[in-house]
Image (cartoon, rainbow, N blue to C red):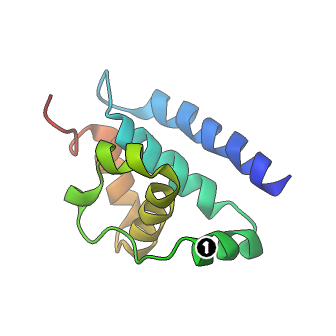
Amino acid sequence: TELYSSIFTHEVAHAIAHENFAVKKPPTVAHEYIAYTVQLATLPDALRSRILTAIPGTGFEHEREISELYMAFDPDRFAVQVYRHFMRSTNRTEFFARLLSGANQEAD
């Protein structure tokens, strides 16, 4: 049930992010970055640890790697990679603010 509850948390994060984006049509990847990060951050430690062990990696090294294509091909790995990227970030609040502002928006 903890994993199922985290799916609810993921969707609530989408709803809150949606109301706070400064751009009319934010990139899906920005939405998912926020939702997956919140989902994994709010999991019980033991479950999060099992997930992180099952999906090895160190997180995205650069923001350019965080893409819709990566997310589409491997959403589970994308979730873990964005969480690890966020946790390594030196200024998490600023990064979320940039996502919400649309500053990282990919060109159409």
For label 1, the residue is 54
* Residue at the image point whose x is 69% and y is 44% from the top: 7
**Image quarter for residue 63?**
bottom left
> How far across and down, in percent of the image, does residue 58 sit?
40, 77
Mark 1 element type: helix
Estimate how packed mark 1 is, as few (under 14), some (14 to 19) or many (20 or more) residues with alpha carbons within 10 Å: few
The residue furthest front is 73
* Residue at the image point whose x is 53% and y is 55% from the top: 76
> How far across and down, in percent of the image, does residue 79 sit?
49, 56
The residue furthest right is 1
For this view, does 26 lie left or right of residue 35?
left
The residue furthest top is 24
Of residues 93 and 99, which is closer to you in this image? Answer: 99
* Residue at the image point whose x is 45% and y is 43% from the top: 32
On screen, 82 above or below 84?
above
For this view, does 25 lie left or right of residue 74?
left
